[in-house]
Amino acid sequence: MNPWKLRRWPGLAEPVLLHDLDLAAPPPVPLIREATLVLERPGADVGFLVHLEAHLAEGILLSTEAKAVQRSNHWRSPLWLVPEGLAGEAGKVIGLRSEYGHGRAGLAVVG
Protein backbone atom coordinates (compact mmCIF):
# COMPACT_ATOMS: atom_id res chain seq x y z
CA MET A 1 0.00 0.00 0.00
CA ASN A 2 1.15 3.53 -0.64
CA PRO A 3 1.48 5.08 2.84
CA TRP A 4 0.96 8.60 1.45
CA LYS A 5 -2.54 7.56 0.34
CA LEU A 6 -3.21 5.97 3.74
CA ARG A 7 -2.24 8.98 5.84
CA ARG A 8 -5.88 9.95 6.45
CA TRP A 9 -7.08 6.50 7.46
CA PRO A 10 -8.05 6.53 11.12
CA GLY A 11 -5.70 4.51 13.31
CA LEU A 12 -7.11 2.47 16.15
CA ALA A 13 -3.86 2.23 18.13
CA GLU A 14 -0.41 3.72 18.33
CA PRO A 15 2.35 1.85 16.48
CA VAL A 16 4.16 -0.96 18.30
CA LEU A 17 7.72 -2.09 17.68
CA LEU A 18 7.91 -5.41 15.83
CA HIS A 19 11.64 -5.59 15.11
CA ASP A 20 14.66 -3.52 16.09
CA LEU A 21 17.65 -4.36 13.92
CA ASP A 22 21.21 -3.13 13.88
CA LEU A 23 22.05 -3.38 10.19
CA ALA A 24 25.78 -3.33 10.96
CA ALA A 25 25.44 -6.96 12.10
CA PRO A 26 23.74 -9.89 10.38
CA PRO A 27 20.25 -10.39 11.80
CA PRO A 28 19.17 -13.74 13.19
CA VAL A 29 17.14 -15.76 10.69
CA PRO A 30 14.30 -16.22 11.08
CA LEU A 31 13.30 -13.02 12.86
CA ILE A 32 10.45 -13.79 15.26
CA ARG A 33 8.92 -11.36 17.73
CA GLU A 34 5.69 -11.04 19.66
CA ALA A 35 4.22 -7.71 20.67
CA THR A 36 0.95 -6.41 22.09
CA LEU A 37 -1.05 -3.36 21.25
CA VAL A 38 -4.00 -1.75 22.93
CA LEU A 39 -6.85 -0.31 20.90
CA GLU A 40 -7.33 3.35 21.71
CA ARG A 41 -10.50 3.68 19.65
CA PRO A 42 -13.23 1.18 18.76
CA GLY A 43 -13.20 -0.30 15.29
CA ALA A 44 -15.16 -2.80 13.23
CA ASP A 45 -12.59 -3.71 10.56
CA VAL A 46 -9.09 -4.28 11.83
CA GLY A 47 -5.93 -4.53 9.77
CA PHE A 48 -2.29 -3.93 10.55
CA LEU A 49 -0.23 -1.52 8.48
CA VAL A 50 3.46 -2.32 8.87
CA HIS A 51 5.91 0.51 8.33
CA LEU A 52 9.65 0.97 8.27
CA GLU A 53 11.54 3.45 10.36
CA ALA A 54 15.31 3.56 9.73
CA HIS A 55 17.74 5.84 11.55
CA LEU A 56 20.31 6.25 8.78
CA ALA A 57 22.61 8.73 10.52
CA GLU A 58 22.45 11.38 13.24
CA GLY A 59 19.30 13.39 12.47
CA ILE A 60 18.42 11.41 9.31
CA LEU A 61 15.28 9.27 9.54
CA LEU A 62 13.64 7.29 6.75
CA SER A 63 10.03 6.53 7.67
CA THR A 64 7.10 5.02 5.83
CA GLU A 65 4.72 5.62 8.74
CA ALA A 66 1.54 7.01 7.18
CA LYS A 67 1.42 9.99 9.59
CA ALA A 68 4.99 11.07 8.77
CA VAL A 69 5.69 9.89 5.22
CA GLN A 70 6.67 12.38 2.55
CA ARG A 71 4.68 12.61 -0.69
CA SER A 72 7.86 11.75 -2.63
CA ASN A 73 8.13 8.39 -0.85
CA HIS A 74 8.17 5.45 -3.27
CA TRP A 75 8.32 2.66 -0.67
CA ARG A 76 5.24 0.54 -0.01
CA SER A 77 3.91 -0.73 3.32
CA PRO A 78 2.27 -4.13 3.77
CA LEU A 79 -1.29 -4.12 5.05
CA TRP A 80 -2.19 -7.32 6.90
CA LEU A 81 -5.93 -7.98 7.06
CA VAL A 82 -7.29 -10.13 9.84
CA PRO A 83 -10.27 -12.47 9.99
CA GLU A 84 -13.67 -11.10 10.88
CA GLY A 85 -14.46 -10.92 14.54
CA LEU A 86 -11.39 -9.03 15.68
CA ALA A 87 -13.33 -5.79 16.09
CA GLY A 88 -12.99 -4.30 19.48
CA GLU A 89 -13.64 -1.54 21.89
CA ALA A 90 -11.09 0.88 23.24
CA GLY A 91 -8.83 -0.89 25.72
CA LYS A 92 -8.88 -4.26 23.94
CA VAL A 93 -5.43 -5.91 23.98
CA ILE A 94 -4.28 -7.67 20.80
CA GLY A 95 -1.22 -9.91 20.62
CA LEU A 96 0.82 -10.02 17.41
CA ARG A 97 3.50 -12.39 16.15
CA SER A 98 5.79 -11.16 13.40
CA GLU A 99 8.08 -13.51 11.45
CA TYR A 100 10.52 -12.93 8.63
CA GLY A 101 13.05 -15.26 7.13
CA HIS A 102 14.05 -17.13 4.02
CA GLY A 103 12.16 -14.67 1.81
CA ARG A 104 8.85 -15.02 3.65
CA ALA A 105 7.07 -12.62 5.98
CA GLY A 106 4.11 -13.15 8.25
CA LEU A 107 2.02 -11.37 10.83
CA ALA A 108 -0.54 -13.16 12.95
CA VAL A 109 -2.86 -12.39 15.83
CA VAL A 110 -1.99 -14.53 18.86
CA GLY A 111 -3.63 -15.21 22.18
Image (spheres, rainbow, N blue to C red):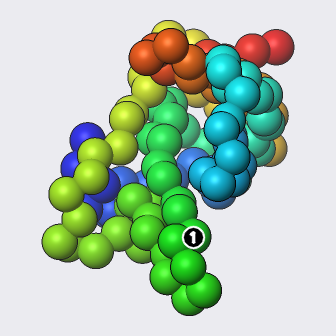
Q: Quadrant of residue 92?
A: top right
- Assign a secondary structure to mark 1: strand
Q: Which residue is situated farthest in the bottom direction here?
A: 59
Q: Nearer the viewer, residue 13 or 52?
A: 52
Residue 23 placement, left or right of 38? left
Q: Residue at x 43, y 22 (%)?
A: 81
Image quadrant containing the C terminus: top right
Give above or below for 97 relative to 79: above
Q: Quadrant of residue 42?
A: top right
Circle 1 is placed at which residue position? 55
Describe residue 44's horizontal placement relative to residue 77 as left or right. Answer: right
Residue beneath the point at 35% across and 69% down? 69
For the N terminus, the quadrant is top left
Residue drawn at x 44%, y 69% as measured from the top left: 62
- Number of labels in the image equals 1
Toward the front, the furthest residue is 25
Residue 7 pos. (x, y %): 33, 62
The x, y position of residue 65, in whole percent, is 45, 60
Question: Badge 1, how many Cα within 10 Å: few under 14, some, many 20+?
Answer: few
Question: Visible in this render: residue 107?
Answer: no
Task: Tell me which amino acid carries mark 1.
Answer: His
Image height check: is 61 above or below 97? below
Q: Position of residue 72 (x, y in %)?
A: 17, 71
Q: Quick one: 111 or 59, which is closer to the camera?
A: 59
- Residue 73 position (above or below residue 1): below
Residue 27 visible to the viewer: yes
Residue 9 in which image quadrant: bottom left
Query: Is residue 79 placed above or below 108 in the rendered structure?
Result: below
For the point 75% across and 15% down, which residue is it?
110
The image shows residue 96 at horizontal and vertical percentages of: 70, 26
